[in-house]
């Protein structure tokens, strides 16, 4: 059974910010992780009716011996400019995951990428 995590933060100066970790379907990141990351990030924003979607994807060093990637998405959302960052990776059992931080364009992209990539690199399953 897969679960997802969502954390929402409200800030008077930067708006609403969300951190999400959720599983993807097997095969979602194959055969090319950067093309898959671009497609998934674009489709998520298109389905939310974001306008002027721009997706920039970069392959990252391997995680758990498998490729990983980060996608930075800019666009015009329902409440103005947005900046969302997504990390795509597969865990040690080859299950695909997405970790995202979404919110307004108040923070520099580099800061969001650095924080989310560090969080992705610390990903571990908790033993119950």
Image (spheres, rainbow, N blue to C red):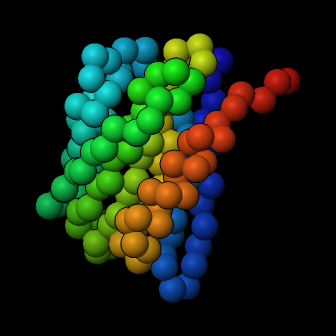
- Who's the residue at 31% across and 44% down the image? 58
Question: Would you say residue 35 is visible in this rendering?
Answer: yes
Q: Residue furthest front?
A: 61
Task: Name the residue nearer the viewer: 38 or 18.
Answer: 38
Provide residue 13's location: percent of width, then percent of height.
51, 86
Provide residue 35's location: percent of width, then percent of height.
23, 31
- Who's the residue at 59% across and 13% down the image? 93
Is residue 110 found left or right of 127 in the rendered image?
Answer: left
Is residue 21 found left or right of 24 in the rendered image?
Answer: right
6 is higher (above) or lower (below) than 128? below
Q: Residue furthest bottom?
A: 13
Provide residue 4's location: percent of width, then percent of height.
60, 36
27 is higher (above) or lower (below) than 59? above
- Who's the residue at 41% across and 77% down the image? 106
Provide residue 111's location: percent of width, then percent of height.
47, 66
Is residue 71 found left or right of 118 in the rendered image?
Answer: left
Q: Quadrant of the C terminus?
A: top right
12 is higher (above) or lower (below) than 116? below
Q: Residue 113 is drawn in which quadrant?
A: bottom left
Task: Name the residue nearer the viewer: 2 or 105.
Answer: 105
Q: Quadrant of the N terminus?
A: top right
Q: Residue 5 is drawn in which quadrant?
A: top right
Q: Residue furthest right?
A: 128
- The mark tally for this picture is 0
- Who's the residue at 29% across and 55% down the image? 73
Task: Name the residue nearer the viewer: 13 or 117.
Answer: 117
Is residue 26 found left or right of 11 in the rendered image?
Answer: left
Q: Residue 121 is drawn in which quadrant?
A: top right
Question: Would you say residue 24 is visible in this rendering?
Answer: no
């Amino acid at each position: 059974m897969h679960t997802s995590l969502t954390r929402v933060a409200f800030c008077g100066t930067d708006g609403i910010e969300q951190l999400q970790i959720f599983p993807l379907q097997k095969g979602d990141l194959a055969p090319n992780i950067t093309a898959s990351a671009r497609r998934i990030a674009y489709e998520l924003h298109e389905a939310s009716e974001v306008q002027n979607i721009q997706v920039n994807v970069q392959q990252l060093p391997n995680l758990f011996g498998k490729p990983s990637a980060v996608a930075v998405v800019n666009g015009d959302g329902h409440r103005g400019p947005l900046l969302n960052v997504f990390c795509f990776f597969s865990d040690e059992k080859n299950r695909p995951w997405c970790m995202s931080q979404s919110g307004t364009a108040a923070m520099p992209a580099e800061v969001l990428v650095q924080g989310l990539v560090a969080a992705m690199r610390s990903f571990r399953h908790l033993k119950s």
